[in-house]
Image (cartoon, coloured by chain):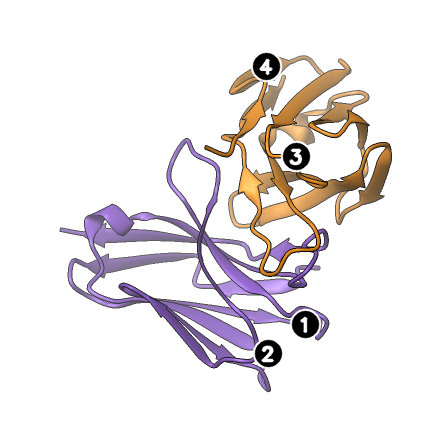
Chain colours: A orange, B purple
Amino acid sequence: DVKVTQSSRYLVKRTGEKVFLECVQDMDHENMFWYRQDPGLGLRLIYFSYDVKMKEKGDIPEGYSVSREKKERFSLILESASTNQTSMYLCASSLTGTVNTEAFFGQGTRLTVV
Amino acid sequence: QQQVKQSPQSLIVQKGGISIINCAYENTAFDYFPWYQQFPGKGPALLIAIRPDVSEKKEGRFTISFNKSAKQFSLHIMDSQPGDSATYFCAASRRYNNNDMRFGAGTRLTVKP
């Protein structure tokens, strides 16, 4: 059974803290993604990675960075958390080079910044 | 700016009715249009998808209709059931590599018994 695992379901952090969200996939997928989900705005792409150490900005990268040192792991970093980063964060992965490629999602991390 | 526009934001349907969700896209490079279904507390999961070389795809009670000239596509849920109550997202990407996949804003569907 394919699996994308996010390290935490719920996190509460203080303003100004450095926050790490971790994601691991066991499907040997090349692509990995970080989205944030907010009511009325849907899923907005923060960053994606198509290979180890490779990354591309999505639509809302400001205030975030990412790290992909191993193929199976993709980390989202909030350098200095702010209250407007309170949200649901979703990690996903997918294959490349196959037809009609499907994205597989983790269960999400609900982050609250106080 | 949202590259994929989805409506309505919420939808309430009686059991047995038809649920219709609409999406429009801008980027003509997109050639793969999936729909994802998300239940509370879960991540989205692929429900059904269509390529632009067909105008309709049906899987059970779920049908995607696609209008390439209008750059629009829609999801129809026939004989809607309370178990279909979820949030639905349309998306658009390229078929062979979805690292540019973009999602709509989502539709929260409630099917009343």
Q: Secondary structure at mark 3?
A: loop
Which chain does the residue under circle 1 lie in? B
Residue B71: % across, % down: 59, 78
Q: Are marks 2 and 3 in contact (CB under 8 Å)?
A: no
The residue labelled by disc 4 is A12
Which chain does the residue under circle 3 lie in? A
Mark 2 or 1 closer to N-term? 1
- Where residue A50 sits, quadrant-wise, is top right
Q: Residues within 10 Å of mark 4 (few under 14, many from 20)?
A: few
Q: Could you say which is closer to the camera, residue B73 or residue B1?
A: B73
The residue labelled by disc 2 is B71
Q: Could you say which is closer to the camera, residue A51 or residue B62?
A: A51
Residue B85 circle label: none
Vertical position of residue A2 compared to residue B10: above or below: above
Q: Residues within 10 Å of mark 1 (few under 14, many from 20)?
A: some
Horizontal side, residue B17 vs residue A28: left or right: left
Q: Secondary structure at mark 1?
A: loop
| Marks 2 and 4 belong to one chain | no
Q: Quadrant of the N terminus of chain A?
A: top left
Residue B90: % across, % down: 51, 59
Q: Residue at x 68, y 72 (%)?
A: B26
Q: Are marks 2 and 4 in contact (CB under 8 Å)?
A: no
Q: Residue at x 77, y 15 (%)?
A: A18
Cα separation, mark 1 vs mark 3, equals 32 Å
The residue labelled by disc 1 is B26
The residue labelled by disc 3 is A28
Q: Secondary structure at mark 2?
A: loop
Specify the amino acid type for callout 3.
Answer: Asp
